[in-house]
Image (cartoon, rainbow, N blue to C red):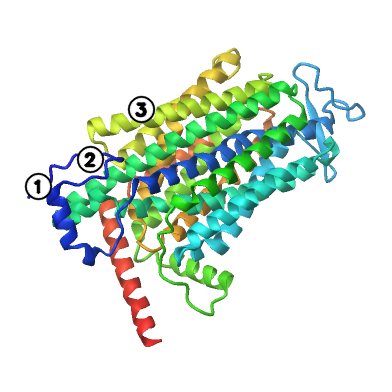
């Protein structure tokens, strides 16, 4: 019998027929249906830790590094003169290990270091979170570490100590990204235990129908979480802007705002923790060294590409595309801050605008997807096409005129609005596609690889951008780099067969569970 249940991400009620079928097969499913309180706890946790990422990681820490490095620098044209930041269009360089670097370049190089640190730290611990209740426990632990790290920026008491921020920044990003792995890994689990999906399975719906329902609810959960996360980011931005304006954009105001984001993150994490169910996995094997076991397990996953070719093609595409997409706003922000004379308050307002538009964009594309019943893969391709239009403007127009092509202040605002509308849908859709392709029971491990593919490649964008500027003196020429990455990434992503990938993931999980049970019986 076909289902007439109306899908909604927050409608957790089932019809009497669905309940009867579900109760008959509850013992076979052996799962606890997703609760509304559980989802909202996850939404709030996403919103608060993302607030740290948006405000501190993406904006305030790079600003603090650039500001402190500039104050400790000298004039680019005369190294005997200290940097005068009150002069319009000032050009300063900062001595670092015997070389004079642009403060914006220093920030980009620190971003590259952050990516490398996140790569190794996430790899060494993420697989542990798939066992027992470690996912939730480690999420709380690293939220505490993130808060402490944000308070550490108070150690930067003078511009000469800008290297303190350069050390704390990679650590903060590492704690933030590890929490991101644990938080994102709930998404595929929530999709499998959503009442609509369980009811469809209990009714004996065809596999194709169940998968469509699961794709719908996972997309909805992801879109709503992104929208709520951006609402949280706007609130944190408001406080940060108030602090910056009240303290006349001083270095101390940035340090206080960074500290606030960390405290806000930890406070809400502890508040919602009782409602965030652990959703435990298989027990951790006894007598195993955490780090050695995690590396071995991750190595086994990486070497399983022959059994999971579709998800590996997706990961390669994500490795390339994430760096390309992430490099675009990085270059944009450096240009508007260094060349269009945007001050701290302007930058904060731009970041707020980006968050607001990201929230609106998430719900706009959510409505578009539902209206035309578009697939996850189509939504990814649509957002990439929109990014390509922006890059076309930023690259082609400067060849014909010197007055446009991110030369005017208003262009900075327009580009911010444009990117904000599409950015959340791109990342949300990519996260959904991984949720659909990853094997059950290995969620943290695959989302760790997802982060590693992202951060493992994201050092290239800032590094290449810094190198291009050093050679050419023009950041705009660096936009060719994300264009090349996007072309290659789209070609690879277009070859991914999602249905085939789901079958591969299911067979992989069944075989792995059978081996685990056989080993347990033998023990």
How far apart in space, not on screen, are marks 3 and 2 (Cα)?
Answer: 18 Å
Q: Which residue is mark 2?
A: 7
Residue at the image position 79 percent from the left and 35 percent from the top: 69
Assign the C terminus to one quadrant of the image: bottom left
Q: Quadrant of the rendered structure where residue 371 is?
A: top left
Q: Earlier in the sequence, mark 3 or mark 2?
A: 2
Between marks 3 and 1, how big is the CA–CA gap? 30 Å
**Label 1 secondary element:** loop
Residue positioned 33% across, 66% down in the render: 509
Residue position marked by numbered label 3 in the rendering: 364
- Mark 3 touching mark 2, by CB under 8 A? no
Label whose residue precedes the other's in the sequence (3 or 1):
1
Badge 3 crowding class, 10 Å Cα cut-off, few under 14, some 14 to 19, many 20 or more, is some
Q: Is residue 132 above or below residue 379?
A: below
Residue reaching furthest to the left = 1
Decide if residue 397 is in sight here: no
Residue 523 vs 307, above or below: the answer is below
């Amino acid at each position: 019998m076909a289902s007439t249940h109306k899908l909604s991400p927050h409608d957790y009620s089932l019809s009497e027929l669905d309940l009867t079928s579900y109760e008959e097969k509850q013992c076979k499913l052996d799962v606890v249906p997703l609760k509304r309180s559980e989802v909202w706890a996850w939404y709030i946790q996403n919103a608060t830790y993302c607030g740290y990422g948006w405000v501190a990681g993406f904006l305030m820490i790079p600003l603090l590094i650039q500001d402190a490095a500039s104050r400790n620098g000298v004039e680019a044209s005369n190294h005997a003169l200290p940097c005068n930041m009150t002069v319009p269009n000032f050009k300063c360089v900062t001595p670092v290990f015997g070389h004079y670097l642009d403060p914006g370049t220093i920030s980009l190089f620190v971003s590259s270091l952050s990516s490398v640190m996140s790569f190794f730290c996430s790899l060494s611990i993420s697989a542990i979170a798939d066992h027992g209740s470690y996912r939730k426990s480690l999420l709380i632990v690293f939220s505490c570490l993130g808060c402490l790290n944000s308070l550490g920026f108070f150690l930067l008491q003078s511009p000469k100590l800008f290297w303190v921020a350069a050390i704390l920044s990679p650590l903060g990003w590492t704690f933030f990204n590890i929490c991101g792995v644990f938080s994102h890994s709930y998404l595929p689990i929530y999709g499998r235990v959503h009442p609509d999906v369980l009811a469809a399975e209990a009714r004996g719906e065809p596999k194709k129908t169940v998968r469509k329902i699961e794709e719908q609810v996972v997309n909805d959960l992801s879109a709503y979480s992104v929208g709520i996360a951006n609402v949280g980011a706007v609130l944190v931005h408001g406080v940060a802007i108030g602090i910056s304006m009240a303290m006349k954009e001083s270095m101390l105001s940035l340090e206080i705002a960074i500290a606030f984001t960390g405290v806000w993150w930890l406070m809400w994490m502890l508040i919602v923790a009782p409602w965030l169910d652990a959703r435990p996995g298989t027990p951790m094997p006894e007598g195993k060294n955490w780090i050695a076991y995690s590396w071995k397990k991750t190595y086994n996953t990486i070497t399983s590409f022959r059994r999971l070719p579709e998800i590996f093609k997706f990961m390669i595409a994500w490795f390339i595309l994430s760096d390309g997409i992430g490099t675009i706003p990085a270059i944009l922000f450096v240009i508007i801050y260094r060349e269009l004379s945007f001050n701290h308050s302007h930058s904060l307002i731009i970041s707020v605008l980006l968050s607001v538009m990201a929230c609106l964009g998430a719900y706009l594309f959510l409505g578009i997807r539902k209206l035309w019943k578009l697939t996850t893969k189509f939504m990814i391709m649509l957002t990439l096409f929109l990014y390509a239009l922006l890059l076309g403007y930023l690259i082609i127009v400067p060849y014909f005129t010197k007055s446009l092509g991110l030369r005017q202040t208003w262009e900075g605002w327009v580009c911010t609005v444009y990117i904000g509308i599409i950015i959340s849908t791109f990342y949300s859709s990519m996260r959904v596609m991984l949720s659909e392709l990853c094997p059950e029971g290995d969620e943290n491990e695959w989302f760790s690889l997802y982060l590693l593919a992202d951060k493992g490649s994201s050092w290239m964008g800032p590094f290449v951008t810094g190198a291009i500027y050093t050679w050419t003196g023009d950041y705009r020429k660096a936009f060719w780099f994300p264009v090349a990455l996007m072309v290659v990434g789209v070609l690879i992503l277009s070859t991914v067969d999602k249905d085939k990938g789901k079958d591969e993931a299911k067979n992989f999980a069944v075989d792995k569970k059978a081996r685990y049970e056989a080993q347990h019986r033998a023990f």
